[in-house]
Image (cartoon, rainbow, N blue to C red):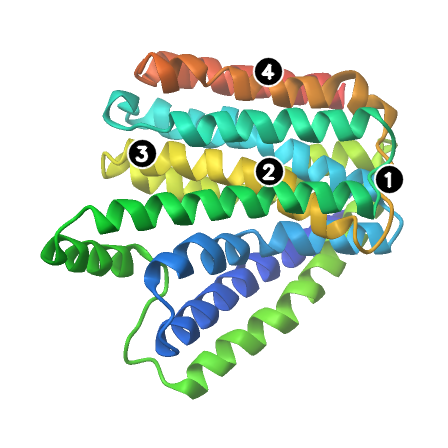
Amino acid sequence: MTSDLLTAALGLALLLFAGDSLVKGAVNMSLRLGVPALIVSLTIVAFGTSAPEMLIAVQAVLDDAPGIAMGNVVGSNIANVLLVLGVPALMTGLRTDECDTRRTYLMMIGASLLFIALCMIGPITWMHGAVLLAALSLILFDAFRAARKHRRETVAAEAEAEEEELLEDLEGVDPSLSWFKIAMFLLLGLIGLPLGADLLVDSSTSIARDLGVSETVIGLTLVAVGTSLPELATTVMAAMRRQADVALGNVIGSNMFNLLAIVGVASLVGTIPLPPEMLRLDLWVMLGTSALLAPFVFLRWPLNRAWGTAFLLGYAGYLGVLLI
């Protein structure tokens, strides 16, 4: 058991390091090739930051451990709301009245309902995956069109300042980075991601077997919390900087991407059966936690310390139900 836990920790660390390296390499290569920062932020960064979860899902399907794949996605979405927003809310509070995420929030709810509907009609096959990826393409196109419209409505000086601000916000941007270092970052990411995913999936399967619990439970807990750590770090930093829009937008965007991209891609390498216990409980907890954000998005309720405490207690209760 101890060796499996250490292997899982090593696999997770390798995934996070490799994912960060891939994002740095891809972002800097794209900008050096003249790709606008707007496109980089909407596509490359989004795919790169979710690369660990995606590789875990693909590896789990290949290893015939679909419970880990689906548990990671659903568990991450639950953790993103209750844990990733709960911790910064408890620390400093989040002024959600300062941001407008209504449009993306409705998209996230739509993605959740689409995902649940596909799960209810049978195992996730490549055809279901194609539907999920098509929905993701529409969302990305809509986001790109809205961003371009906003930029056209600004004067040239404001647009240039906005581009510079976006470049500063992109993780790992270094205009002086050499092509050799860019290649090294890409190579480390491409090698480390599948290796880390293989270690984490194999060790998680062994841990589930040793504890006498299902792979789904391990995916919903250990793997989901581990892969949510980057989002947690981002939201804590955003809360400390009083950037509630970044914190809330990060969670909403991550949840959409988890459902549409990760499951969509994983289904292309094999059929993903849905564990029966997930149909009974976890999908509805995921939908309920997503719906829980509605008053903070539409009524602009502040996510204060009391709400942060309630979110964390709710997450602890959910974990207790899974593990007891």
Q: Identify the residue at horizontal 24%, vertical 50% (top origin).
A: 151
Distance Cα–Cα, label 2 vs label 3: 22 Å
Reading the chain from its start, which is encountered first: label 4 or label 2?
2
Q: Position of residue 215 (x, y in %)?
A: 82, 37
Reading the chain from its start, which is encountered first: label 4 or label 3?
3
- What amino acid is found at the position of numbered circle 4 in the picture? Gly
Q: Identify the residue at horizontal 38%, vertical 20% (top origin).
A: 297
Q: Nearer the viewer, mark 2 or mark 3?
A: 3
Q: Which mark is residue 288?
A: 4
Q: Position of residue 269 (x, y in %)?
A: 82, 56
Q: Position of residue 195 (x, y in %)?
A: 70, 66
Q: Which residue is mark 2?
A: 225
- What amino acid is found at the position of numbered circle 2 in the picture? Val
Would residue 3 be seen by someone viewing this image from the given angle?
no
Reading the chain from its start, which is encountered first: label 2 or label 1?
1
Q: Which residue is mark 3?
A: 245
- Left/right of residue 218 with respect to residue 182 in the rendered view: right
- What amino acid is found at the position of numbered circle 1 in the picture? Asp
Reading the chain from its start, which is encountered first: label 1 or label 4?
1
Task: Decide which of 217, 292 is in the foreground and name it.
Answer: 292
